[in-house]
Image (cartoon, rainbow, N blue to C red):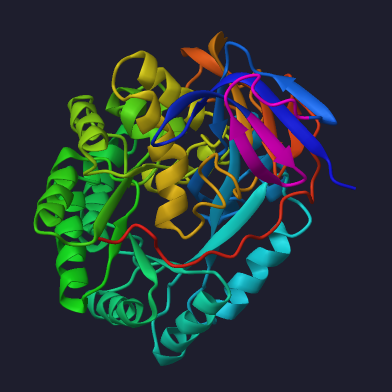
Amino acid sequence: MTTRTVIRGGLVITASDEIHADVLIEDSRIVALAAPDSQDWSADRTIDATGKYVIPGGVDAHTHMELPFGGTFASDTFETGTRAAAWGGTTTVVDFAVQSVGHTLREGLDTWHAKAEGNCAIDYAFHMIVSDVNQETLKEMDLLIEEGVTSFKQFMAYPGVFYSDDGQILRAMQRSAENGGLIMMHAENGIAIDVLVEQALARGETDPRYHGEVRKALLEAEATHRAVRLAQVAGAPLYVVHVSAMEAVAELARARDEGLNVFGETCPQYLFLSTDNLAEPGFEGAKYVCSTPLRPKEHQARLWQGLRTNDLQVVSTDHCPFCFTGQKELGRGDFSKIPNGLPGVENRMDLLHQAVVDGHISRRRWIEIACATPARMFGLYPKKGTITPGADADVVIYDPHAQQVMSAETHHMNVDYSAYEGKRVTGRVETVLSRGELVIDQREYTGRAGHGVFTPRSTCQYLT
């Protein structure tokens, strides 16, 4: 039996269009759009979207559920994290499976499949963190691409944990140039940063704010430049994650002006938070420790400009939550021991809508950087990221006029604080469908663990 859902009366917003239209869904797919009330569609379920936006479900291409880090684990499981994502209007996450040094990519991927399978409220996919580049790893990259894991993250930071040297990075990039994979880069000069950390601690500079001071913007820019040139030598595309500094944006803009397939992602924390948060009194600044770190406020204007000019293409969250009590506190007296990461998977779509309200970006650009481009960048389009016949029925009914105050008291992420505590925003998710099934219905959670399924991806669809 086919289940039919009709969404009537809303303003359908995609990356390319804004049209008043009714949307017909059959089972898990969108099958038609039509002028309002022009079709007498019969339906099992009718959703009234009058006065609301009808938008594609968000695609968050950078999350870390259950990530081991600094002697603890990210506090959101795949069950709690994907439920919170749905509350925030995100219907697909791309999480990072981790290869540990001395182990294979396959072992890492199998571990993450086991964590996620049967537990997710929304659909999910994986990137692969490559921590140990060798001949076997390079061969495995080809096999993972055949399975729909088509992007590989490397780190210029975290020596002794995830770090790859320039030679290892070049080898992986050369392989991706052959097999169609996309290298994602954490671009910070970790070797130099470790020297600055050691020197700061020796001076007795132990508070959270020093995390931002030692991870200098110039060391992000230097690493970004180096990653771009290594990718150019390899003839491979490059995606730089969590860009936070204006100097790094300049490196990406220069590379793109040269016609290189170089892309950049930023995150809400860099657009809305700053070193002022890291410097909050007592140990409160620990809540805002992430890498790349928060920057002084003057960097924000350049990030917004980069999003408008397409020097930055995607806004993801880098959602990696650690509770203040018992986890962030591991770094009391030594900022280098504070687990790196912020909660945000539930806040991204609302914060970016606030950016529309504030005039930073247009409505269509909101959908482009949060839904369509991440889907294209990581081989999910047009199955995800748009509202068109044939696409998965991942649809959000969004109230652009509702007011809300962000708070740990009301969010659904499994973490004891909000990075945006007390922030007032305009706009709120009302109803969410994932492959045609109601996950959030008029602000009530109706989803279930296990509805979300692993979604294999094609290679990058955004190359010039």
Q: Estimate the x, y position of residue 67 in percent, counting from the top left.
A: 57, 55
Residue at the extreme right: 1
Note whether 99 is above or below 269 in the view shown: below
Q: Estimate the x, y position of residue 447 in percent, counting from the top left.
A: 79, 37
Q: Estimate the x, y position of residue 211 in percent, counting from the top left.
A: 31, 41
Note whether 237 is above or below 133 in the view shown: above
Instruction: Name the foreground residue: 81 vs 19.
Output: 19
440 on left or right of 93: right
Q: Is residue 284 visible?
A: no
- Residue at x 38% of width, y 75% of height: 180
- Residue at x 55% of width, y 70% of height: 148
Instruction: Name the foreground residue: 42 vs 195.
Output: 42
409 on left or right of 315: right
Boundaries of the magenta span: 23-41
Which quadrant of the rendered structure holds the C terminus?
bottom left
Q: Estimate the x, y position of residue 226 in percent, counting from the top left.
A: 16, 64
- Residue at x 22% of width, y 28% of height: 296
253 in the magenta segment: no
Instruction: Name the foreground residue: 452 vs 50.
Output: 50
386 on left or right of 152: right
- Residue at x 58% of width, y 16% of height: 52
Q: Is residue 361 visible?
A: yes
36 in the magenta segment: yes
Residue at the extreme bottom: 135
User: In the rendered picture of this protein, how many numbered marks are placed on residues?
Assistant: 0
